[in-house]
Image: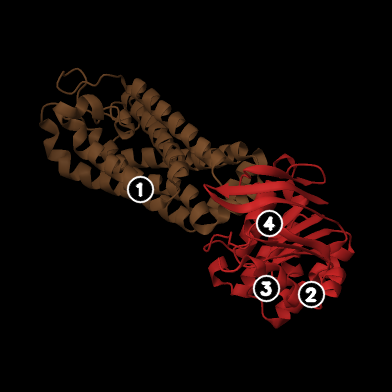
Amino acid sequence: MISFASAELTKLRTVRSTPWTLAAFVVVSAGLAFLLELTLRNAQRMEGYDPLMAAFLPLTLGQMALVVFGAMAVTSEYSSGTIRASLAAVPDRRRFFLAKVAAVAAVAAGVSLVTVPVTVVAARMRLSSAEVLEACAGAWIYLTLMCVFTVGVATMVRHTALVLGGLLPVLFLGSQGLGNVPAIRKVTQFLPDQTGWVVMHLAGPQDDPRWARDYSAWGGLGLLALWTVAALLGGYLVLRRRDA
Amino acid sequence: MLEVRDLEKRYGRTVAVDRLSFTVRPGMVTGFLGPNGAGKSTTMRMMLDLDHPTGGQVRIDGVRYRDLRRPLTKVGALLEAKSTHAGRRAYDHLLWLAQTNGIPASRVSSVLELVGLGGVGRRRAKALSLGMAQRLGIAAALLGDPPVLLLDEPVNGLDPEGVHWIRGLLRGLAAEGRTVFVSSHLMSEMSLTADHLVVIDRGRLLADVSLADFVASHGSLEAGFLSLTAGGGAR
């Protein structure tokens, strides 16, 4: 199993899309955080303003690059035909899939572990208070799970365009719009990308009934874990059944 | 030894492989002949458990492919469709393959030398010519030094020198006692390389004979092949 996972890491390391997407994730997140903090500095006296927003909202945009990385780790196998070599080398599809998921998760977790604090510092926040550290830990878990969730979805649909065409609108609309429309928030708050908003201080003050979600900060991440498990299960069932 | 028993593949009502049974023996080159669309590639993908048969089975020395431990050290395969990422270097493609089966990284360099790609291992797959890409595929098949080789149309894209090289390679591998199963639609090539023939058309077995017997009964390989496959008429 270790040898399968290290082979998957080699695959990730030896294509150029990996450094490009991961660099975009860090640069977009930290760059936007720096700019957003400059813009919002004067708004800090506003009621209900949460300074953590300038740090964590950019991460929800930077995550697009991380999602592209997760999607391409799977879809490039199919577009290039590598999947046939992969499954001939590792005919046990359950183990192949576990190794792929483990490798992508490890890279996503590693890069997020750097990106989150860098983004927070770029927004001129100190990594000192328990509140900030809790939000950082939540963001780290959220970003890693989103990337793994994407691996599951990508294994089901197999084409980059379909994965991104399906996920990016959800991520953009869910985050930037629909999530705050009161009438449909009852439902959209449960979309995968929205589940991390409470822990990242983006969902508004939770003691205000106008913004309160039906789950807690860590409960939201629990929901995302369920989404991820469901996507991985779906991906595995498709992988097991189909011809390569 | 490679045993195919009652192998069948249906896509809805279409039958691609129709209850195919034959045995491929070690120590010789077995040619797998048939016109385009006869079901050769589908059969070879099922041998590797890439496609799921709708009936029958394939055994490699009595074991199903999916039950092989370190399968690259038992069966080496070259598939007709490309299976390398265009942006990955030739060396790296072989490296991750080696890692999956616990093959030492030093074997990657030696197998690149063996197929004549020693100088271009750092090139990305998309920068390889058709012939070089085919040699890389053969390097991948030889990576685990396997006793069984399955090669789907290996001379595709090779120049005359490459064709000559692969002929010698296949003869040599068979002489070492390996099981060598090679598909082709090129009869002239098969008549120079194969010891034994398995001929199929529209998924059905038409002949399973030695090359010598086949030529003796039909006059030539080409004449025999055409008379066997002409029965189907237009498709």
- Return the residue at label 3: B119
Q: Are marks 4 and 3 on the same chain?
A: yes
Q: Earlier in the sequence, mark 2 or mark 4?
A: 2
Residue in the picture at 29% in, 31% down: A194
Chain letter, disc 4 residue? B
Q: Colour of chain A?
A: brown
| CA distance for labels 1 and 4 | 43 Å
Q: Earlier in the sequence, mark 3 or mark 2?
A: 3
A141 sits to left or right of B42: left
Residue in the picture at 65% in, 56% down: B203
Q: Amino acid at mark 3?
A: Gly
| CA distance for labels 3 and 1 | 39 Å
> Is the residue B87 above or below the residue B62 in the image?
below
User: In this orientation, does residue A124 appear?
Assistant: no
Q: Earlier in the sequence, mark 4 or mark 3?
A: 3
- Return the residue at label 2: B191
Residues at discs 2 and 1 in contact (Cβ within 8 Å): no
Q: Mark 4 or mark 3, which is nearer to you?
A: 4
Q: Which chain is red?
A: B
Q: Nearer the viewer, residue B94 or A201?
A: B94
Q: Amino acid at mark 2?
A: Ser
Q: Are marks 2 and 1 on the same chain?
A: no
B57 sits to left or right of A175: right
* Category of crowding for the residue at label 2, using alpha-carbon neighbours closer than 10 angstroms: few (below 14), some (14–19), many (at least 20): some
**Residue B204: assigned label:** 4
